[in-house]
Image (cartoon, rainbow, N blue to C red):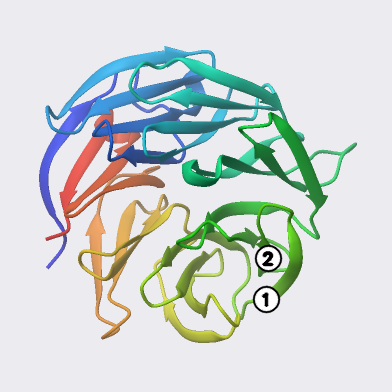
Amino acid sequence: MPLKTVGTIAIPNGQDSDFDHAAFDPKTRRVFIAHTARGCIEVIDHDAQKHIATLPGFPAVAGAVADDGEILTTNRGAATITWMDAATYEIKGVFPSGQRPNGAVIVKNRQIGIAACIGDANQGPTLQLIDLKQMTQRCIELPGRPRWCVTDANGERVFLCIREPSMILSARLPDLSEIAYWPLPSGGAHGLDIDHARNRLYAACDDGDLVEIDSKSGKVTNVWPIAGPPDVTFFNPATGRVHVAIGNPGVIETIDPRSGDRITTVTGAGAHTTALVGPDRLYVISPSHGGVLVLSDG
């Protein structure tokens, strides 16, 4: 059976607009959504199930990530990274980045922010690390266009999808050392998440596959077909299932890695981005719904 729809949440100016990566902050119980077309962050109160704020000043924002009351955004239109308090919306820092910053991670207990920058004709792709305590930055060059990234449970390593050649880059934090490149059997590595308990990465690829990788060794341990070129990918530790958003034709592919069982849930055309609200909600940001389609992952 498809995932059950439990409601919708309207976003101002959200009808047929363009959104990107979103994140749930458990400390404030808020969902922060990159509203790319409007250059702002939309804030949803999960418990109240309503939109509570539109935060301007994030040009062509590509993504928002959260950790324990802190938010990091990648602003493609300004080549900047913004660090923000999730409760007060206070801007704690704005940092220059490489051109077209994209995937991001924030690790509060290590005071680290990470952004993967696509680059342009004059500047190649880079992976940038910000020391949020010292307000210093460092970066490394990348072998191809970066997509999404995650860290291990302790924030000791970062894992990054690279589109072409399709691979996972693994690097030690905070110095971005001990770099390894793990090739994938499917082209166009894109969405990425991690099962910390089983040390498994899940990379959704443009060629139409979800690839499971051992996060310790880089070994590919399984591959499942999906319905089309994917984007945002979340693993739910409460259910053990992986959710992959596919904007065209507009579905969520849900795969249980333990059994290989697959569920397809129709969402809406262009709904390529989601946020997981544990333990049992998946927020699908859907332009055709003018906001958020809330699904049950129970």
Residue 58 visible in this rendered orientation of the protein: no
Q: In this view, does 161 lie above or below 80?
A: below
- Which secondary structure, mark 2? strand
Q: Is residue 116 above or below residue 257?
A: above
Q: Circle 1: is it few (<14), some (14-19), or many (20+) Cα within 10 Å?
A: some
Image location (x, y in percent) of residue 134:
68, 31
First in residue order: circle 1 vs circle 2: 2
Q: Is residue 99 left or right of residue 186?
A: right
Q: Looking at numbered disc 2 in the image, what kind of residue is underneath it?
A: Leu
Residue 24 visible in this rendered orientation of the protein: yes
Image location (x, y in percent) of residue 61:
55, 28
Q: Looking at numbered disc 1 in the image, what kind of residue is underneath it?
A: Trp
Q: Is label 1 in contact with label 2 (beta carbons under 8 Å)?
A: yes
Q: Is residue 266 left or right of residue 79?
A: left
The N terminus, quarter of image? bottom left
Looking at the rendered structure, which numbered label has been put on residue 57? none
Q: Is residue 149 above or below residue 269?
A: below
Judging depth in this view, the residue of 49 and 271 nearest the camera is 49
Alpha-carbon span between mark 1 and mark 2: 6 Å
Name which residue lies at 70% across and 35% down.
Answer: 100
Name which residue lies at 38% across and 78% down.
Answer: 198
Q: Mark 1 points at which residue?
A: 182
Looking at the rendered structure, which numbered label has been put on residue 169? 2
Image location (x, y in percent) of residue 105:
53, 46
